[in-house]
Image (cartoon, rainbow, N blue to C red):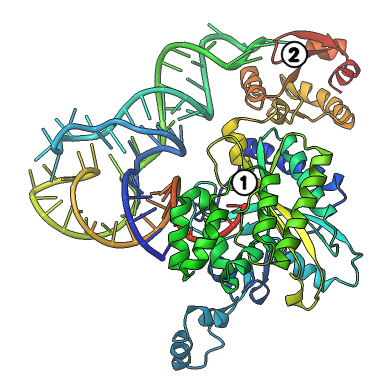
RNA sequence: GUGGCCAUAGUUCAGUUGGUUAGAAUAUCGGUUUGUGGUACCGAGGGUCGUGGGUUCGAGCCCCAUUGGCCACCCCA
């Protein structure tokens, strides 16, 4: 039998893991610099915690876990199975599955906050870096198992949080050297638009259609709106918006006029204006921030600001980071009026972008700094205490384990692992106590005491 | 969930209108007389050609099914 792994999953080699950890470490450092602390939640949640939180589509993409033991135990007769089956796939699932792999980190976080509300001091700022699973069909930049790196603050209405999240996105991608555009919008603006054109109820259909503007064009959007039952008058009213082009400031002024009659719309504009003004005052390092009226984002728990980040280089056009404000995510778990805002970095997509653009610093390659090359048992025995000494000094080092391996083999090992220095120890070195330190890059070699070697490599 | 393309050593691929023991490069391991890697030369192992069926005297090549991969749509990190 040929070994294989499930569709949409991947193995990561040491070289790949070193690169991935570089990304995770960068993100983690930024999160901590802004006062976020880590939590973890289980890989699986109760199915009831997850269902209904991601919309109709999302429910289908949740990986359900078959009940352990006899998952037929709910049924006493075959008729009952047939009866259950006739209720449809979704209803049938409830009989045989009560757990599922988590689909994102935000909903488990909301569950966590409600469950631990009496231990938490609010506002609560946490970050979480864990894999999530989606039963999606894999394609470019899309996997069935992937890591999300979330930072959320819950229990604070202040827009300072939004501003800081924008700064964090800027910090992460500046460090990673990826040029990005941060697209910002506000669900309240979208609600205002739906209200103004008289199709308040169809907000989801409207936003989903508008979201595709740069992909399918104005005609495509109008077609889709029509297919979703939006009347011609409303579509006509939407045209100035779809066709509008201009700077963020011009967009804001335009929206103020368009949404003059919508209280919620004006509130959204006010929020967006504050975020842009404050961010501009702080100046971003490398990221560009822009107001994108067509940005909608699928997850329907967002109620305020929404963010999406795209790389401004390379071929991956899907978003590598996204987030927004949700006013009542914990309400469904019994804790109302708890506003939160957060972002999620897609580590796997960022990894793909960095690979394509080859943006890794050179230091990311090597882990072992020093390899001991020896000629036999005696030399190995001599080296072990020295190795311990080097390690105690905090230098990553190792000794070639097979005492009788040929020198060529040992050197090749060092070369393959990109170890920058080797120490060669034979009878000469044992007698004098001066070890041959070789710089693998330059080929230079010198005789030094172990103390000098430690000093040099520190 | 819908559609398109693809499937041959670990990897990237070649394989001529169906015709003998399916090749290359690269990687791996070993060697080029035993204290010097990344170069060169020699050698070895590694494939029931994704799987199952069919057509044929004969299938890696043609047909059907199935599974998997890539890509687009849907949706999304």
Q: Please state the chain letter of the residue tagged with numbered disc 2 in the rendered image.
A: A
Q: Residue A148 got which mark?
A: none
**Residue A343 rendering spot, x and y as whole percentages:** 73, 53
- The residue lying at 87 percent from left, 10 percent from top is A432
Q: Mark 1 = which residue? A: A348
Q: Residue A438 got which mark?
A: 2
- The residue lying at 58 percent from left, 40 percent from top is A352
Classify residue A103 by image quadrant.
bottom right
**Residue B50 rendering spot, x and y as whole percentages:** 35, 49
Q: Please state the chain letter of the residue tagged with numbered disc 1 in the rendered image.
A: A
Classify residue A450 by image quadrant.
top right
Q: In this view, does A209 lie above or below A450?
A: below
Would residue B53 appear left or right of B24 to someone viewing this image?
left
Would residue A289 appear left or right of A211 to someone viewing this image?
right
Disc 2 and disc 1 on one polypeptide chain: yes
Alpha carbon separation for disc pair 2 and 1: 37 Å
Q: Is residue A446 above or below residue A389?
A: above
Q: In this view, does B31 lie above or below A47?
A: above
Residue A154 shows in the view: yes
């Amino acid at each position: 039998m040929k070994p294989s792994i499930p569709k949409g999953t991947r193995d990561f080699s040491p070289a790949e893991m070193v690169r991935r950890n570089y990304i995770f470490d960068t993100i983690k450092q930024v999160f901590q610099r802004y006062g976020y602390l880590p939590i973890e939640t289980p890989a699986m949640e109760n199915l009831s915690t997850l269902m209904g939180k991601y919309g109709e589509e999302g429910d289908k993409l949740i990986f359900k876990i078959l009940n352990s033991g006899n998952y037929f135990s709910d049924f006493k007769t075959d008729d009952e199975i047939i009866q259950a089956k006739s209720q449809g796939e979704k209803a049938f699932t409830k009989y045989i599955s009560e757990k599922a792999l988590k689909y994102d980190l935000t909903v488990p976080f909301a569950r966590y906050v409600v469950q631990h509300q009496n231990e938490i001091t609010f506002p609560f700022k946490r970050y979480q870096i864990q894999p999530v699973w989606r039963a999606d069909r894999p394609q470019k930049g899309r996997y069935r198992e992937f890591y999300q790196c979330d930072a959320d603050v819950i229990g604070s209405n202040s827009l300072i949080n939004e501003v800081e999240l924008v700064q964090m996105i800027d910090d992460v991608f500046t460090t990673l050297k990826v040029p990005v555009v941060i697209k910002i919008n506000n669900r309240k603006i979208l609600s205002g638009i739906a209200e103004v054109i008289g199709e308040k109820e169809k907000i989801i259909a409207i936003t989903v259609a508008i979201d595709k503007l740069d992909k399918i064009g104005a005609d495509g959007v109008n077609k889709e709106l029509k297919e979703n039952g939006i009347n011609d008058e409303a579509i006509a009213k939407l045209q100035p918006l779809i066709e509008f082009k201009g700077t963020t400031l011009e967009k804001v002024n335009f929206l103020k006029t368009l949404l003059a009659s919508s209280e919620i719309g004006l509130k959204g504009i006010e929020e967006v204006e504050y975020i842009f003004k404050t961010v501009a005052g702080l100046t971003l390092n490398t990221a560009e921030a822009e107001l994108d009226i067509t940005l909608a984002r699928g997850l329907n728990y967002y109620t305020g600001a929404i963010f999406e980040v795209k790389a401004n280089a390379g071929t991956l056009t899907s978003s590598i980071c996204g987030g927004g404000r949700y006013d009542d995510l914990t309400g469904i778990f019994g804790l109302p009026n708890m506003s939160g805002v957060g972002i999620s970095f897609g580590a796997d997509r960022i990894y793909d972008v960095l690979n394509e653009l080859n943006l890794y610093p050179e230091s990311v390659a090597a882990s072992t700094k020093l390899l001991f090359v020896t000629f036999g048992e005696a030399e190995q025995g001599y080296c072990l205490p020295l190795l311990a000494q080097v390690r105690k000094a905090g230098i990553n080092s190792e000794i070639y384990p097979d005492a009788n391996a040929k020198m060529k083999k040992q050197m090749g090992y060092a070369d393959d692992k990109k170890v920058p220095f080797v120490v060669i120890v034979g009878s000469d070195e044992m007698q004098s106590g001066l070890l041959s330190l070789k710089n693998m890059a330059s080929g230079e070699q010198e005789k030094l005491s172990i103390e000098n070697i430690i000093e040099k490599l520190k």
